[in-house]
Image: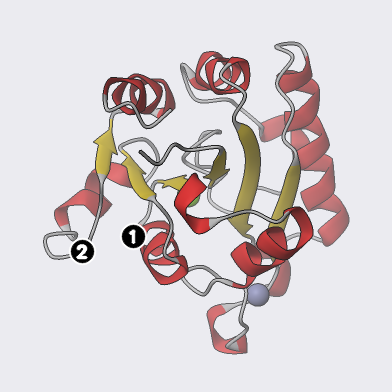
Amino acid sequence: MAKIKNLLLDRDGTIIVEKHYLGNPDDVELLPNAKEALKKFTQKGIELFIVTNQSGIGRGYYKTEDFFAVQNKLYDILNEYNVKIKDIEFCPHTPSDNCTCRKPAIGMWQNLKKKYGLLENETAIAGDKLSDMYFGINAGLLVNALVLTGYGLSEKEKCSNIKIDIIAKDLLDLYYLLEEQRLI
Ligand SMILES: [Mg+2]
Ligand SMILES: [Zn+2]
């Protein structure tokens, strides 16, 4: 039976509190249970990646260097818990750029797949938006998991006819649900 070896994580609203165009490291705030969840995934030997749409860059709300400052703040916090994010992919474009990397397009998945030899049937996506779910569907990932943090609750109302494999309260709940279903 297929098992998840790689977990692709949306960032805003999934790992950290959704702050609506976050460009200031001082505003990084982890969601409750996020550190514990990521630590558990790490202890299971699951590789963690972030795939994040950052149209705030393309819209001119913050710069790429601000985005990296935010990332470094997040890494510092996760380091204390011995959690390592193996790599991050981000899309700096706006919807009107029609790029191939903004979720639900799968450019970020294709980059990671090529770079690390990842397989679809060993990879899951966790995110708080339907664009994360469509990303997983478009990429053909094993598990598409919606978390009800961030925009998750309101997004859930819109998702009647799309393939969502798991709906979890947060990342920690997701960990236990995946364990229960023997997917990790
Ligand atoms: Mg999000
Ligand atoms: Zn893009």
Residue sitting at x 63%, y 36% = 48
In depth, the one of 96 and 108 nearer the eye is: 108
Residue marked by disc 2 = 162
Neighbours of disc 1 within 10 Å: few (<14), some (14-19), many (20+)? many
Residue 131 lies, in percent from the top left, at 40, 64
Q: Are marks 1 and 2 in contact (CB under 8 Å)?
A: yes
Residue sitting at x 82%, y 61% = 63
Residue marked by disc 1 = 130
Residue sitting at the far right: 65
- Quarter of the figure with residue 81: top right
| Quadrant in which ligand 2 is drawn | bottom right
Q: Earlier in the sequence, mark 1 or mark 2?
A: 1
Does the beta carbon of the residue at mark 2 sit less than 8 Å from ligand 1? no
In this rendering, the label closer to the viewer, 1 or 2? 2
> The residue tagged with tag 1: helix, strand or loop?
helix
Residue 154 lies, in percent from the top left, at 23, 49
Q: Quadrant of the N terminus?
A: top left
